């Protein structure tokens, strides 16, 4: 999962008829996720979506919204089953927002800058829903593990461990626990991945893992654990390593693993000296390679000023989302795109020949044959009620 700088800054037309399942298909191919309970009904969500996580039987949606689908307890995190919304427990998360979600063994883990999840005083910034209620997780005392008004931005399960990344420092009063901690899923016991204070020099925005259990972290750090090439992105399997022989360049905003390969999005241009590798590369365990190119094959697909915040895959398709306009000179080439192994193309439109919506995209997920997007956008596909989250068929 990943997070962009927009997450850090969030807190300092005519509607279409509903189908039988509460969905509306807009002219640009994107669908609203139900509506609220007002009369006449409005958008199902009233605030930004900053986390999406597809799991068995449910898509978990997190952000700054309240009353998803008009349900009073569905605040800041809610469950969408493809046709309707539901809350997680009777007592919602406290003030703030959810920026990351993970699941394991029937439990849901949420990270963000919220406090008092489920009314529990120690459930700040990180909490677990056990199927009945929210509880603190990964803290050594009855006090919150995270303090100082900072944030949990990324979660990743690897085997029996939940890795937690963000902007926090000194978690559980451990001077080494800056920006990343490891939590035993069975016991909740926290641990660290470095030897001393200062080995982590910057925030973690994104985490992912390959099938062999290697953890990948991305963010703003440099020389992680003293490794000269571990700038912005690094891998961990008992010890930290850099990727390649030179830094990737810029902030790493998104990571997504598919098998043993990892897609990395950053602010860097010409990554690895490759002219087509602008903002996005694929790491195969030994070297970077470009992921497609513009139509002429001479440069990257994404404009120089792009921010790619989210990545996901389905079969042979790679999806990227973030903040950009007119990629490859196409008026529909805004904020979300797909790559089929040979070329990039826009994903939907606003129904009138422009990009699919107005506003940044923060998250992507695949659930039950559909691509879901979440962010700060409004009017997906031209549907005025498709705000902050939307879906469309994968093909």
Image (cartoon, grey):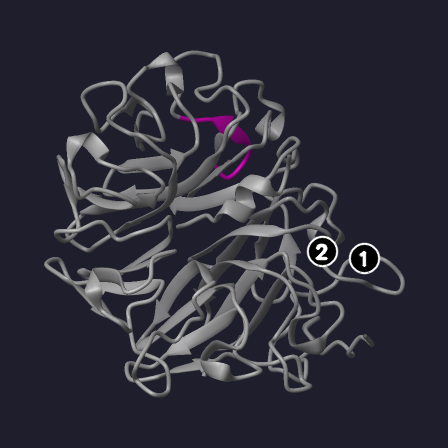
Q: Which residue is mark 1?
A: 37
Q: Quadrant of residue 268?
A: bottom left
Q: Residue at x 41, y 76 (%)?
A: 338
For the question of whether residue 271 can be seen, the reply is: yes
Q: Quadrant of the C terminus?
A: bottom left
Q: Is residue 127 above or below residue 35?
A: above
* Position of residue 266 measured from the top left corner of the image (x, y, whole percent): 36, 56
> Between residues 254 and 27, which one lies in front from this camera angle?
254
The question of residue 305 being in magenta is answered with no
Give how far across and how far down residue 3 sits, in percent.
46, 48
295, 212: nearer the viewer: 295
| The residue positioned farthest toward the right in the image shown | 39
Find the magenta span and give its range: 128-137
Residue at the spot of label 2: 69
The image shows residue 75 at horizontal and vertical percentages of: 66, 42
Note whether 136 is above or below 227 in the view shown: above
Instruction: Name the residue at 43% across, 59% down.
Output: 310
Q: Disc 2, disc 1: CB below 8 Å? A: yes
What is the quadrant of residue 196 in the picture?
top left
Q: Is residue 13 above or below residue 208?
A: below
Q: 13 and 130: which one is in front? A: 13
Mark 2–mark 1 Cα distance, whole angstroms, equals 7 Å
Q: Secondary structure at mark 1?
A: loop
Residue 129 in view (yes/no): no
Label 2 element class: helix
State which tag comes first along the sequence, 2 or 1: 1
């Amino acid at each position: 999962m990943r997070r962009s700088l927009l997450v850090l800054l969030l807190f300092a037309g005519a509607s279409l008829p509903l189908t039988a399942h509460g969905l509306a298909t807009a002219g640009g191919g994107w669908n609203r996720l139900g509506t609220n309970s007002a009369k006449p009904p409005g958008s199902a969500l009233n605030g930004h979506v900053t986390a999406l996580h597809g799991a068995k039987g449910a898509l978990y949606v997190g952000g700054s919204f309240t009353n998803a689908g008009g349900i009073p307890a569905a605040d800041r995190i809610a469950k969408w089953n493809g046709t309707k919304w539901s809350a997680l427990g009777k007592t919602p998360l406290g003030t703030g927002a959810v920026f990351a979600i993970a699941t394991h063994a029937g439990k849901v883990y949420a990270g963000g800058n919220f406090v008092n999840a489920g009314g529990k005083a120690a459930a700040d910034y990180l909490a677990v829903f056990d199927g009945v209620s929210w509880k603190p997780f990964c803290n050594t005392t009855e006090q919150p593990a995270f303090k100082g008004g900072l944030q949990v931005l990324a979660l990743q399960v690897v085997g029996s461990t939940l890795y937690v990344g963000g902007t926090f420092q000194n978690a559980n009063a451990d001077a080494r626990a800056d920006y990343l901690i490891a939590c035993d899923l069975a016991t909740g016991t926290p641990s660290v991945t470095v030897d001393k204070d200062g080995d982590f020099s910057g925030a973690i925005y994104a985490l992912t893992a390959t099938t062999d259990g290697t953890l990948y972290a991305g963010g703003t750090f440099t020389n992680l654990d003293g490794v000269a090439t571990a700038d912005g992105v690094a891998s961990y399997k008992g010890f930290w390593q850099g990727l390649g022989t030179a830094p990737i360049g810029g902030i790493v905003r998104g990571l997504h693993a598919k098998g043993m390969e990892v897609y990395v999005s950053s602010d860097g241009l010409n990554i690895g000296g490759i002219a087509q590798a602008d903002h996005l590369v694929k790491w195969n365990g030994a070297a970077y390679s470009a992921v497609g190119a513009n139509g002429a094959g001479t440069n990257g697909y994404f404009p120089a000023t792009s921010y790619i915040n989210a990545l996901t895959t389905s079969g042979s398709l790679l999806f990227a989302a973030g903040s950009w306009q007119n990629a490859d000179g196409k008026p529909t080439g805004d904020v979300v795109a797909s790559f089929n192994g040979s070329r990039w193309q826009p994903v939907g439109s606003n129904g009138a020949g422009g990009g699919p919506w107005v506003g940044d995209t923060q998250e992507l997920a695949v659930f039950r044959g559909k691509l879901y997007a979440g962010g700060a956008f409004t009017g997906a596909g031209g549907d005025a009620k498709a705000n902050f989250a939307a879906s469309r068929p994968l093909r």
